[in-house]
Image (spheres, rainbow, N blue to C red):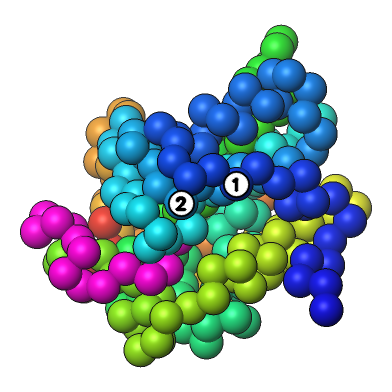
Amino acid sequence: KKTLKTKTFGLKLDVLETSVSTQEEARELAEAGAPEGTLVVAEEQTGGKGRMGRKWFSPKGKGIWMSLVLKPAQPLHYMPQLTLLTGVAVCRAVRRVTGVMAGLKWPNDLLVDGRKICGILLESAAEDEYVRYCIAGIGISANLDAEDYPDELKPVATSLKIEAGEAIDRVQLIAAVMEEFEALYDLYRQEGFAPIALLWEALSVTLGKQVTVYTAAGPVTGHAKKLDHSGALTIVTEDGRELPVFSGDVELRR
Ligand code: BTN
């Protein structure tokens, strides 16, 4: 039985025992001309990277630490859409393979009961405001046990194993992510962002909530209303203004 039913995603595959960061391995492959869909997976990362310069805890054999090369041939300002698409792909795969009903926190964290189960980091190389390639980094806390987490992560993180009550098959999940990702990516190229936005909204745990978004320009507090056509999160502030937020960290309020 063939595990991976894709046309290109994940077919060129590099599996490493250890890596500083699969983002860097994938970047080197992309610079050397690797085709779209090339995937790098590591058992362990010694310098795993998170968003906003944070570290990503990547212990050996416990998670899915991987980076996918994409070549979307579009202007750089469409990147937020691809970020959201990646979250939808992982969320659908996680639900399908493990039954864990994870939801998406804008832009693309996967949460279960408010705890993080997966992080996504998209990095791109551009020329004249046009994407040359992009690296979609996906970190899924698959088979970590509660005691594997350092104390500062214990209250905010969980894993699929903890939530599902049994170890999950990482190979099946990686294959499912590649399938969902490729199908959504094809849809995105044919129909644009609108259908992706609908799928994202249906999986969201952010919309309809009071939130504070910490942006580079300062915090914005209000009601998270919808995604706009570009992928920005529309916040309705207390004085009734609608503000699009393009990047930042969301804090969900009660
Ligand atoms: C975040 O939530 O801050 C994003 C975390 C992204 C982690 C993944 S693990 C595979 C890839 N390699 C890295 O160094 N980071 C990403």
Q: Which residues are magenta?
A: 140-153
| Crowd tier of the residue under label 1, counting other residues whose Cα lies within 10 Å: few below 14, some 14–19, many 20 or above | few
Secondary-structure class at tag 1: strand
Circle number at residue 132: none
Secondary-structure class at tag 2: loop
Circle number at residue 43: 2
Query: In the rendered image, which residue does mark 1 sit on?
Result: 15
- Give the x, y percent position of residue 176: 68, 69
- Residue at point 26%, 73% (across, down): 145
Mark 2 → mark 1, Cα distance in angstroms: 8 Å
Task: Work out which quarter of the rendered image holds the N terminus and state it.
Answer: bottom right
Task: Work out which quarter of the rendered image holds the C terminus and state it.
Answer: bottom left
The amino acid at mark 1 is Val
Do residues under tags 2 and 1 come within 8 Å of each other at their CB atoms? Answer: yes
- Residue at point 40%, 75% (across, down): 160
Q: Is 189 in the magenta? A: no
Q: Is residue 232 visible?
A: no
Mark 1 or mark 2, which is nearer the start of the sequence?
A: 1
Circle count: 2
Q: Is residue 39 above or below residue 91?
A: above
| Direction from residue 164 to residue 175 in the image, left or right | right
What is the magenta segment's predominant secondary structure?
A: loop
Picture quadrant of residue 48: top left
- Residue at point 46%, 51% (across, down): 43
